[in-house]
Image: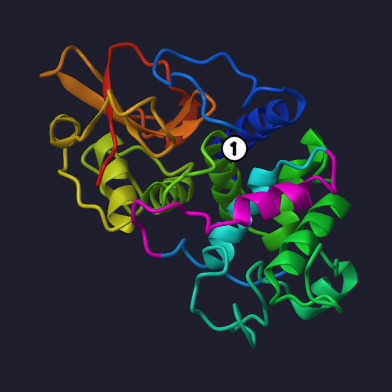
Amino acid sequence: MGKLVGLAALLLIVAVLALAVLAASVWGLPRSAVSGPASAPSPGGSPSAPGPADRSPALPAGWATLEQAAAATCPGLPWAVLAAIGTVESDSGRSTAPGVDSGANAAGAEGPMQFEPATFAAHATVGPGGASPASPYDPVDAVYTAATLLCSDGGGTPSGLGGAVFAYDHSTVYVDTVLTLALAFGEDPALDGAAATALAFAAGQLGVPYRWGGDGPGGFDCSGLTRAAYAAAGVPLPRVAQDQYEIGPAVGAAGPVRPGDLLFFGNGPSGVDHVGVYVGGGLMLDAPHTGAVVRIEPDGWPGFEGATRPG
């Protein structure tokens, strides 16, 4: 991170994840009027981007159950952190990049959770129904081994979670991305591919300066950030917040706001002047104003006008 805002964002996300561990309800936070009711509850080299973005679930069938069972072997470890790591590393096993199904990537990493061989050997865990001996290419063994590694690095405690994720890939951008996606998966296990990709992109911009008219890299305004995030997901958006709001589709009768939805603020339906992307836990990620940076903050900005679900 190397920047105070990155540390602040990290601590905010870790604090919310910690509440998820301690509370019986999802996240255990007061819900804002925007958020609505909640839904039901370095091993490798450079992580790959989440896979092809669409409105199908970001997690393949059975992966949430697998990750929940693996996380249970480390009391206090949020299962959604495993979901986020798998999504970033290999699109939860769906990536066709070298090293996912066989072989290794350019950095020597293997399997859907992208372990370096020595790291996997040191923490190899055979999960129920997994390969024996443990294999980094077997999804069950890979996820259970990731849980073992994170636990050994302190991931089962609120104070150790951020450091455990950092140790997994030694990148502060990686930590921001994983913990942001974990917050989203924790609120919405059915998070779709477009939302996951947009959130991953936006999380990678934490700490980037606000720049009026900025489309990145190096600077964003509020609508420039949301436009770039959804462009990464293959979903085109207009340039300004008002037009993004008008293009919809609006979230309303379709149900409560979900992670990845865009939140709009202003002085009436024709006076929209700010937009952020909902992360989960009553938080949004946005580029707020001149002199600030891309950050995560509570979604309770004044003048809420509505939400949309791009794509």
Q: Which element type, helix, strand or loop, lies under badge 1?
A: helix
Prevailing SS of the magenta stretch: loop
Mark count:
1
**126 or 19: nearer the eye?**
126
x and y percentages locating residue 160 in the rendered image:
80, 41
* 262 w.r.t. 164: above or below: above
Q: Is residue 6 left or right of residue 160?
A: left
Residue 149 appears in the picture as rendered: yes
Q: Is residue 128 left or right of residue 237?
A: right
For this orientation, the residue located farthest to the front is 129
Residue at position x 64%, y 28% in the image: 16
* 186 w.r.t. 172: above or below: above
x and y percentages locating residue 262 in the rendered image:
32, 33
For this orientation, the residue located farthest to the left is 270
* 105 w.r.t. 303: above or below: below
Q: Is residue 13 left or right of residue 230?
A: right
The part of the image, by quadrant, that contains residue 139 is: bottom right
User: Disc 1 residue type?
Assistant: Gly
Q: Residues within 10 Å of mark 1 (few under 14, many from 20)?
A: many
The part of the image, by quadrant, that contains residue 34 is: top left
Which color scheme is applied?
rainbow
Residue at position x 69%, y 60% in the image: 170
**281 or 108: nearer the eye?**
281
For this orientation, the residue located farthest to the bottom is 103
Q: Which residues are magenta?
A: 52-75
x and y percentages locating residue 182 in the rendered image:
59, 43
**261 or 127: nearer the eye?**
127
Q: Is residue 159 left or right of residue 305?
A: right
Residue 172 appears in the picture as rendered: no
Whether the magenta-drawn stretch holds residue 104 is answered as no
Residue underneath mark 1: 186
x and y percentages locating residue 37 in the rendered image:
48, 20
